[in-house]
Amino acid sequence: MRHWAGCERQYFGYIDSTNRRARMLARDGAPHGFICVAGNQTEGRGRRGRDWVSAPGLSLLLSIILRPKVEAASRPLFSYAIALAAADACEAACRLDTWIKWPNDIIIQGKKVAGILLEGEGDAIIAGIGINVKQKEHDFPTDVRQKAASLEMVSGKRIDLDWLEAALLDSIETRMDGADCLQAYRKRCITLGAQVCVIGENTWKGTAVDIDPSGALLVRDSDGIVHTVFAGDVSIKGENGYV
Ligand code: BTN
């Protein structure tokens, strides 16, 4: 039984961005677990200032307000809990191995099926989750077509949006209330052990060797020096598609 995730729900046929709305509601005191869900977004936001483009009725577009009672230093771990929860829900829907590309892209069969945007609002964290569910290849913008897929494309199954929303909320509660998820995250993270290209102020190559509790990725360069890289500062590309 679920206790708090989705305790209150606002649904919008169209909205600019569920994350933007959830931030406003969090400012006005909306409780831990409050969700905003939309059929479509006109200004969906992705990580690192990118857009998140969707079409009506094809995706699960959901933002949840989190008010975790933990010290600030542990907060990066919530990014891992939410990524694991999204991966759990996608895996349950598709019955296919589901991976996480650091920090929180959800990958099935080498394609990105979901993305997560975490934003702070005062004491609250807004976790915005976009899952591609019913798209066909031509529904994706041309620039992401090679890299993106929907759950129905990869699984060949029909997936119900309401069922997926419930599965996601169940997983969010389980992962957030459960034991330290860093170890579970490491097991699910395809970036670990891979050759990666770190794209920030400079671009360089290395091997992703670990994840640390502050949320950073540790990358060893060709001189053997291990660098700590933070998701807000760099983007990571695999040498062969997604890592
Ligand atoms: C990414 O991979 O860049 C993150 C994408 C996050 C998209 C979701 S859709 C629901 C929520 N509302 C937004 O505007 N963004 C997030």
Image (cartoon, helix red, strand yellow):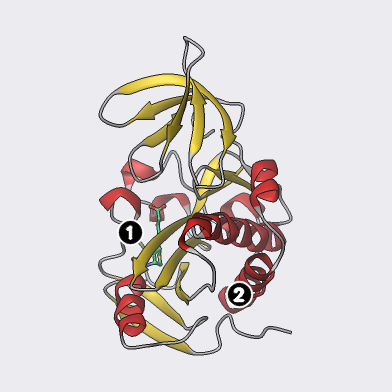
Q: At 70% across and 42% down in the image, what residue appears?
A: 187
Q: Amino acid at mark 2?
A: Leu
N-terminal label among 1 and 2: 1
Location of mark 2 (residue): 169
Where is residue 230, by image quadrant?
top left
Say what secondary structure mark 1 lies in: loop
Query: Taking 10 as reference, is 15 left or right?
Result: left
x, y percent for residue 63: 44, 72
Label 2 Cα crowd, 10 Å radius (few <14 / some 14-19 / many 20+): many
Query: Taking 24 as reference, is 219 left or right?
Result: right
Position of 234 relative to 76 (above/below): above
Q: At 46% across and 86% down in the image, what residue appears?
A: 31
Which dot marks residue 53? 1
Q: Quadrant of the C terminus?
A: top right
Quick one: 32 or 94, which is closer to the camera? 32
* Quarter of the rendered structure image containing ligand 1: bottom left
Q: At 46% across and 17% down in the image, what residue appears?
A: 221
Q: Amino acid at mark 1?
A: Val
Which dot marks residue 188? none
x, y percent for residue 48: 30, 48
x, y percent for residue 57: 44, 73
Asked whether residue 236 is in view, the answer is: yes
Q: At 58% across and 79% down in the image, what residue appears?
A: 162
Label 1 Cα crowd, 10 Å radius (few <14 / some 14-19 / many 20+): some
Quick one: 13 or 208, which is closer to the camera? 208
Q: CA distance from mark 1 to mark 2?
A: 23 Å
Say what secondary structure mark 2 lies in: helix
Query: Taking 75 as reference, is 167 left or right?
Result: right
x, y percent for residue 142: 33, 44
